[in-house]
Image: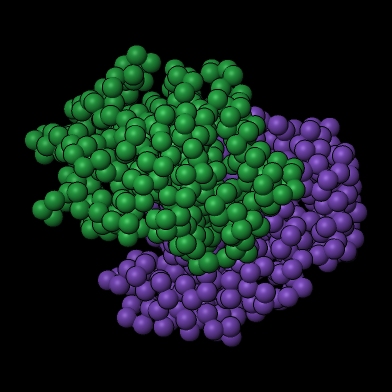
Chain colours: A green, B purple
Amino acid sequence: MQNFTYKNPTEILFGKGMIAEIATRVPKDVPVLMTYGGGSIKRNGVYNQVKAALQHHNVCEFEGIEVNPTYETCMKAVEVVKQNEIKYLLAVGGGSVIDGTKFIAAAAEYSGSDPWEILTTMGGCLKSAMPVGVVLTLPATGTESNSNSVISRKSTSEKLHFFSPHTHPTFAVLDPETTFSLPVKQVRNGIVDAFVHVMEQYMTYPADAPLQDRLAESILQTLIEVGPKTLANLTDYQARASFMWSATLALNNLINCGVPQDWSTHMIGHELTAFYGPDHAETLAVVLFGVWQHQLAQKEAKLRQYGERVWGVKTAQEAIDATEKFFLSLGMPTRLSHYKIDAAEAAARVHARFTERGSVFGERGDITPSATAAILRMRA
Amino acid sequence: MQNFTYKNPTEILFGKGMIAEIATRVPKDVPVLMTYGGGSIKRNGVYNQVKAALQHHNVCEFEGIEVNPTYETCMKAVEVVKQNEIKYLLAVGGGSVIDGTKFIAAAAEYSGSDPWEILTTMGGCLKSAMPVGVVLTLPATGTESNSNSVISRKSTSEKLHFFSPHTHPTFAVLDPETTFSLPVKQVRNGIVDAFVHVMEQYMTYPADAPLQDRLAESILQTLIEVGPKTLANLTDYQARASFMWSATLALNNLINCGVPQDWSTHMIGHELTAFYGPDHAETLAVVLFGVWQHQLAQKEAKLRQYGERVWGVKTAQEAIDATEKFFLSLGMPTRLSHYKIDAAEAAARVHARFTERGSVFGERGDITPSATAAILRMRA
């Protein structure tokens, strides 16, 4: 086990009806900006629950944070924050709304000349950020209980991430019922997103961390158990609750304590979304198997452990195959051809971008730009 | 899954050499009281590491917090706090030192007439407490990352617990090397203590919480794997590290999110320590099997699940037997006779005390004073 520091101060408020609790968590004595997306929260009742809980608060609203939140939109919200002397941000929505709101929180207090630096320094330039509370309506990214954020820039087709101890949400409401109205596609995306988050922190090499391994396997086993259930019955409270809690624990910094991490699937996937537009989770479901196949020798010991414990199979290849079969059983495509993306072209574009940035990925730093191109060519 | 709130703001600083990090965590501008036990930290080098880290801090010391920390000793420390206008407490030691320091932190700011009320109200009377940082030297109780504390009162042979959001440590250093000098008995106690902590939160009834179940089983499996290793080689860093992290996660409020809890083994065990003096973990290793045998019908489904997943056995009884065999293999006695405690007498005393207090225990509230007596009679 490697040395580590771990701190996760976000208060989780979990279960049906818990939105009412935010009345005592959101400060009453300062102007609050409630941020949200395209308005689905007005159709599913979440907007009304939040407004009822905050009826005695001073709340402004910012609507329109899009899927893959953009720098351009977030900077408009920063203007609203400044004009209204907002002191607290309440993000109501899925990962995109929360990620966007974290960026707004950081950019509003950033004293440098260009807030894009928050992304190019991966948050390292931040000295503070506004406090952010969260009402989560889409289980997937884990952003409700970590300090990460991913922001896209339209003008340059870039998609970058940052993190900072200053952007850890103060609280997060997770009411499974608020997610019942999600379409099947978003539920499926969430299951795959959470699954791959675990894999980025687990599927590396043995690192004398048996507890972390088992915690990661616990989340994988739970997603395999409840994922199909929650897709089959979109209003099964218990299945949705376990999926929702799994997605949070998949990326709240707990399972990566003291172990190596990969994240190459995410890095390559981000570029596919930026260049071609598939959903984040859809890109992960394509890239993951390329990374595993390309790194089979390096990851063999963990792939075998995973296969034995989670799927009851013996070889690394069987573990890969069982996982791809699981994704396909959820209705999640695993090939670029499904999105009519030419693998050779995607490989060339990603290779060029990573070469330009000097990027290398993977738990051993051996996934070079050439390797990312090879990985994508394997996923035609 | 039941509704829950979860918040654990303690920063964990894990690994060899991490004591140096407290230089930036303990405030420099206020008087600090360093609390510790019988002086073992002076023999194993921890005292020197702490003093070196805090060489530019204003540090007073309070030595002599005993095993099963007493109200009487802690109140002496409260006087020291007041006389020296201490504003920060640093507990350096095992569970007893940390629990005692939490009580000192609470009592020093308590405005009521009798600080013993902190125990009789189980912390409910607390409006604030001084901040506490922790350097842990004994993996066992989990107190380094939760808000619980157990305090004994010599004058009345009472042993009571309290908890409060105000007594959550601000940070906890977990350096496995600082625990290498522990005697075998204390390591064994720690393994059993952590194991039973998990059981109190897991061995109840199925509650539609598959992730929490698997997280709990992960800790049990890890303790079963690394417990014997760390006992066999007291300076095996990796085994000790995984044991240490397991003991923290066993009682940091994570695995009990949204599930029923028992705690009857602890409640009965506390009385055995108060009346007869065996170590805390020693009492748990006796009582646990009585509780399970007495509640076999109520706990059967979870005992079977545990047996199948953790021990590869089929029946609840086999799961009980495998666990007792595991404890015995660690050298941990599981019968009252080992401590020359008369089971009938212990049953009568515990029955009288719980009757006086009107106590009932267990996840269903069905462990009455009579049941506790029956449980103890089974452990002759």
Image quadrant for the C terminus of chain B? bottom right
Would you identify the image quadrant in which residue B239 lies?
A: bottom right
- B368 vs A36, nearest the viewer: A36
- A64 vs A62, nearest the viewer: A64
- Residue A164 seen in the current view: no
Q: Position of residue B379 (x, y in %)?
A: 88, 51
Q: Position of residue B41 (x, y in %)?
A: 56, 80
Q: Residue furthest top?
A: A43
B264 sits left or right of A220 in the view: right
Would you identify the image quadrant in which residue A132 lies?
A: top left
Question: Who's the residue at 23% across and 47% down the image?
Answer: A106
B336 sits left or right of B33 in the view: right
Question: Who's the residue at 45% across and 62% down the image?
Answer: A365
- A27 vs A323, nearest the viewer: A323
Q: Position of residue B7 (x, y in %)?
A: 46, 45
- Residue B323 seen in the current view: yes
Q: Residue furthest left?
A: A83
Question: Who's the residue at 54% across and 40% down the image?
Answer: A195
Image quadrant for the N terminus of chain B? top right
